[in-house]
Amino acid sequence: MRFADEVSNRPEYIYKYRYAYAYGAFHGFSMVSCGSIAHNHTSAIFIVGAREPGYARGMGCIPRDNFKDSLEAAEKYVGKNPRTLVLPGVFTKPGFHTFRK
């Protein structure tokens, strides 16, 4: 990678990765890559309550304001009995291990 050494070794970046909730440069790419696995095995992915709906759309997901709207929209893909995956709130905040000294 063109900037791998710079991104990996800059002291201010390392500090931010370890103590200031920053993500490494590879994080975004790995999230998109892992997200593509879900797209390969589903008809649609709805994101409920996205703070930035444009990002959800950009990753091929369908943002909705609430679960009711999502379930209604899902009917066109899977009928009246969609399977759902709801992540707990713990996944909406930084992990505790990212700022341990």
Image (cartoon, helix red, strand yellow):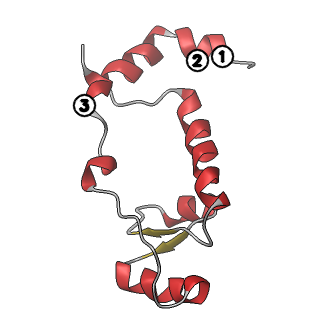
Q: In the structure shown, which secondary structural element does the residue marked by tag 1 occupy?
A: helix
Q: For marks 2 and 3, give the CA distance.
A: 23 Å
With respect to residue 85, does 5 lie above or below? above
Q: Earlier in the sequence, mark 2 or mark 3?
A: 2
Q: Are marks 2 and 1 in contact (CB under 8 Å)?
A: yes
Circle 3 residues within 10 Å: few <14, some 14–19, many ≥20: few
Residue type highlighted by circle 2 = Val
Name the residue: 45% across, 74% down: 83
Judge left or right: residue 90 versus residue 12: left
Q: Which mark is residue 96?
A: 3
* Image quadrant containing the N terminus: top right
Give the secondary structure at mark 2: helix
Rendered image: mark on residue 4: 1
Q: Which residue is mark 2?
A: 7
Residue located 26% across and 48% down the image: 90
| Horizontal relation, residue 3 to residue 48: left or right | right
Q: Secondary structure at mark 3?
A: helix
Q: From the viewer's perspective, is the residue at label 3 or at label 1 nearer? A: 3
